[in-house]
Amino acid sequence: MADSTTAPSWNNVPAKKRGRPRKPPQEGPIIATTIRSQVTRTVTMGAYTERVFTSYIEWASRELHITKQHATTVFLDRAICDLLNRDEVWKKLQRSGRDGDVTDEHAAVQNEIRR
């Protein structure tokens, strides 16, 4: 008789675990990605956010052996794309085409966000 924590197994073959396998533990900064192109933009943020951001950038640049500028670029690229990818209302608007003409650049941004 199978216990209540596992699925029954037939012919004494252990039942397979279902679901997504566990993700391997993260071993370094999550921002370890490549940037294809860059633009310069000035942003304003809260003082606390800036302190945490600066601390993260200093740590990530040391861990990845990259410049602070490059760490900043990949961090912002990853964070913004992740945020936009989770915004269901914005994605629905983008799919509807109500935001204007879809250009090649717009399509490239959408592909980058989906990554």
Image (cartoon, helix red, strand yellow):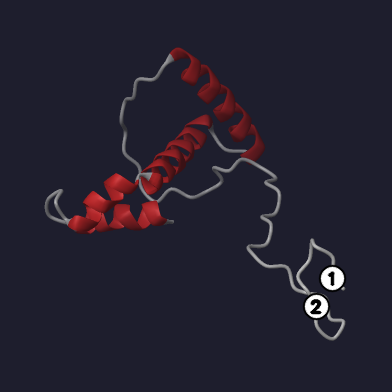
Q: Residue furthest top?
A: 47
Q: Quadrant of residue 12?
A: bottom right
Q: Residue at x 56, y 46 (%)?
A: 32
Q: Quadrant of residue 114?
A: bottom left
| Numbered marks: total | 2
Where is residue 102 drawn, in percent x and y?
17, 57
Q: Residue at x 29, y 46 (%)?
A: 89
111 or 37: nearer the eye?
A: 111
Label 2 amino acid?
Answer: Ser
Label 1 amino acid?
Answer: Ala
Residue position for label 2: 9
Sequence order check, earlier mark of 1 and 2: 1
From this view, report whether residue 106 is shown above or below residue 50.
below
Quadrant (top left/top right/bottom left/bottom right) for the C terminus: bottom left
Residue position for label 1: 2
Where is residue 66 drawn, in percent x and y?
57, 38
Q: Residue furthest front?
A: 1
Q: Residues within 10 Å of mark 2 (few under 14, many from 20)?
A: few
Query: From the viewer's perspective, is 7 left or right of 28?
Result: right
Q: Residue at x 52, y 17 (%)?
A: 51
Q: Quadrant of residue 104?
A: bottom left
Instruction: Look at the numbered discs 1 and 2 and tell me whether their residues touch, using CB distance below 8 Å.
Output: yes
Q: Residue at x 55, y 29 (%)?
A: 57
From this view, report whether residue 78 is shown above or below residue 52.
below
Which marked residue is nearer to the observer: mark 1 or mark 2?
A: 1
Where is residue 33 drawn, in percent x and y?
52, 49
Where is residue 20 drawn, in percent x and y?
63, 62
